[in-house]
Every structure is written in C-alpha cells, then in structure tokens.
Amino acid sequence: MNDRSRGAGLQARLLDGIELIGNRLPHPFWLFLWLIVAVAVVSEVVAALVSDSTAFSGDTAPRPVLRPDTLRWFVLHMVENFGHFEPLALVLVMLMGVSIAEGTGLIPAVMRGIAASVPKTLIVPALFGLAACGNIGSDAGIVVIPPLAAIVFKELGRNPIAGLLVGYVGATAGFTANLLPAGTDVLAMALTNAATRGEPEITVLANWYFMSASVVLLSAIGTFVTVAIVEPRLPPGPASSGVKMSGLAPEERRGVVVAGVVTAILSIAWLATVVPEGGALRDPNPDQFWRSPFFRGLVPVLFSLFAASGIAYGIAAKTIGKPNDILEHMIGAMRRMAPYIVLILAISQFIELFQYTRLDQLIARSGASLLSGLGAKDAPIPLFLAFISAVAFSNMFLGSASAKWAIFAPIFVPMFCNSAFIPRSLNCCIESVIPSPIA
C-alpha cells in the first residue's frame, strides 16, 4: 500500500469515527438535561471540598443543588428562568421581522438580482459574499444560493458542481459573517450578556466590524481555493447550457426599488434619533455614544427595517394580497423556531442553575488565576487560538450554534472577564468559529 492509500484510509477512518460520535450524541435538549445533572453532582462535590475553607464563605460559597432550598428556588423560578431568558425574545423578534422580508420574496429577489448583474470576472467572490450575507434571512443563504450558484456556473460553461460547492461553503462557513447585523449576532450577544448578567453589557454591533470584514476575507480565500484548487480537479463544464439564470421579473424589480426607497427613508428617520445632539435615542454623554439606547435597543430598529421593506416589496410586487399574509409569514417563522424554543427551555434552566450554584464564580476565579499565572494577559493570542480550536473541534460533533455557545459562554465568559478581557473579544471568537461546513 502506497503512502497516498494509507493516508486516504486513515482519513476515512477518522471521518467515520467523527460521524459515529456525532450520531451517538443525544439531541441538544437531552444534552443540556445531562449537563444539569452534572452541575448538581459537581456542586455537591465542590461544596463538600470547600466547606472548611475560609476563602469560600458567604456570597462566594458554592451552593449544593440537592437541598430543600434549591428545590424551593427551582419551583419559584423555573417559569421565570424560561420567560425572562433574553436570547429567546431577542431572536424571535428579530426573526419575525426577517420572516416578512424573506416570505414576501424580497431577500431571494435581492440575491438573484445581484447574482444576475455581477460581471463574469467577479461572479465567484460575489457568490461567496451573497452566500455569507444570506444568513440575514436565517437559512435563506443555504437554501437559495447553492442551486443559484450551480445555475450561474453552468450558464458560464463552468462545472456546476463547483458552483454548488461555492454556494454551500459560502453559506455555511460564512454563517455568522455579514455586512449587516443578523440573527446570529443577536443570539451571540444575548448569550454573552446572560453569562455576564449584563455587567459589562455588549450590543448587537459588538463585532460587526469583524463580521463584515470576514465577508471580504471569505470571498477572497474562497475564490482562490475555487479557482486554483477545486475547479482544476473537476471535469470541465458544458460549453453551453439550456438552463438560463432568470433575472428579476418587472414586478420584482419594482418591488426591490420600492423596498429600497422605504428602507432609505426609514433609515434616515432612525438615524435622526441618534446622530444629532439631543437625539431622542442618543446618550447625553458623548463618551457613551455607542452605549446609547439606539445601539442597546438595535433589535427593534432592525425589526422595523426588515418588516417595512418586506411589506413595501410585497405590496409593490403583489406577493401580499391581504394584511393577514404578513401574519402568515411571521407565524410560519415561529413554527420553524419551535425546536429552538423547546431547546431554550433546557438551556435557560442550565444557565440559571449554573449561576445559582455559584460554580460560574468559582470557575471564573480559578480560571483567571490560572490564566494570570500563564501570562495570558501579556500574550493573549495563544489563549484565543486555543479557545477557537476547542470550539472548532466541537463543531464536528455539535451542529447547533446556540447549543455550543450556551455551553461555552457560562464557563469561559466570566473567566475571561475576570482576567481583564472584554466580553466582546470572546464573543468575536465564538462568532468567527461557530459556523462549519462539516457540522
């Protein structure tokens, strides 16, 4: 057996092992229930070990779970833990607005319009960028862009399989990258704030500069890999194709124009509340501009922009026949979010119980001491690379982004904060590595 065959066999066995482990993992809901059991056991052990220590007393003493006090706390707070869990409301509100823009056809129309108008020389980076930005419509990028990219490649006489890969990899590897704030930013922000209890609080724009730059970087790297590596290994595409990529119909073009005008007018109106001094949503303190109510409450702003533009498109393109059609799009989005809502029931109880036992404080202090001893503050790059690698490894077994960050955030966010790192630095790491074409 030559070296190539041995390497291929080893790679196949490794991938088979990863697939086996991934298939054996329970649904994230059951995973979090097991984590709750683990917290209960660990809290009992830790409480017994530090019971005689003067370093852990009063408000810093770990609380064991298997006690009457904890049962009373759980009975009184279970519904509150779920209902007051910030990520739930933020994500649902954001997606209700996005669902109108997606359901009326605005988001798919914009994607197809851009793809049809881009010069041939720029089509590959444009498709990567579109696929990444498609996450603003939840799974719209994954559903719309791969077949669209395959048609584009076939029409250009290139192998459509390469186009399909461009669309899929761009949408999955770039699932948290975007030129605009998206639902993934809202989710990561909310889980990070839940882990710190809002002190310090980050906004949905905390890592926008990084996520927007990631679109450009992904497009550049993806284009190089596609042109230099993937396409040369595939057979050439057909010289011509009978399948033509359709542009926008007249009513769709009219809808996009009207939606753009409405979005521009509404954006100017919102900016008028924060840009001028004395604006209704501007903080009076100039040093707190980015902490203004406008940025701290950006989700309602985004909701209004998506909803208004979607409604404007629907009316102009005649994809909305009656007011109840708007409600159907919103209700449909909530149906699709039912698994997420059920998962949040377990996630919220895990995070609140973890904080109730004060294990988060114990791990944060112990971890901060360890990081300080390792000199992490003076040389943070290896620390962040290690954290990114750990999350990237978990991508192969756990596909849910919300489940991953709900596990990592309560442990690592307080630890990093106690080591003088700002929460958004860790939020940036998690958003950069959560997406995975493998997961």
Image (tube, grey):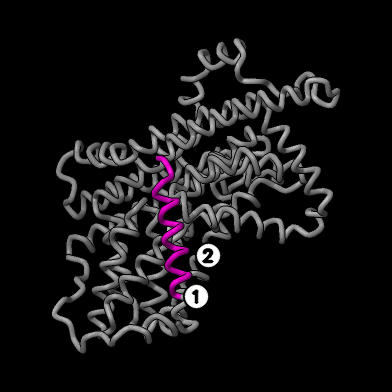
**Disc 1 secondary structure class:** helix
Q: Which residue is mark 1?
A: 221
Q: Main secondary structure of the magenta part?
A: helix
Residue 294 in view of the camera: no
Quadrant location of the C terminus?
bottom left
Quadrant location of the N terminus?
bottom left
Query: The residue under label 1 is which amino acid type?
Result: Ile
| Residue 44 point in image, percent of width and height | 66, 23
Q: Is residue 10 magenta?
A: yes
Residue 269 against residue 122 in the figure, above or below: above
Residue 318 in view of the camera: yes
Residue positioned 28% across, 68% down in the render: 113
Q: Is residue 320 magenta?
A: no
Quarter where residue 166 is shown: bottom left
* Residue at the extreme right: 54
Q: Which residue is mark 2?
A: 214
Residue positioned 69% across, 45% down in the render: 286
Residue 173 against residue 403 in the figure, above or below: below
Residue positioned 21% across, 61% down in the render: 252
| Residue 21 point in image, percent of width and height | 45, 51
Q: Which label belongs to residue 299?
A: none
| Residue 42 point in image, percent of width and height | 64, 29
Residue 245 against residue 187 in the figure, above or below: below
Foreground label between 2 and 1: 1
Mark 2 → mark 1, Cα distance in angstroms: 10 Å
In depth, the one of 264 and 437 nearer the eye is: 437
Report the label total.
2
**Disc 2 secondary structure class:** helix
Which stretch is magenta? 8-26
| Residue 374 point in image, percent of width and height | 81, 53
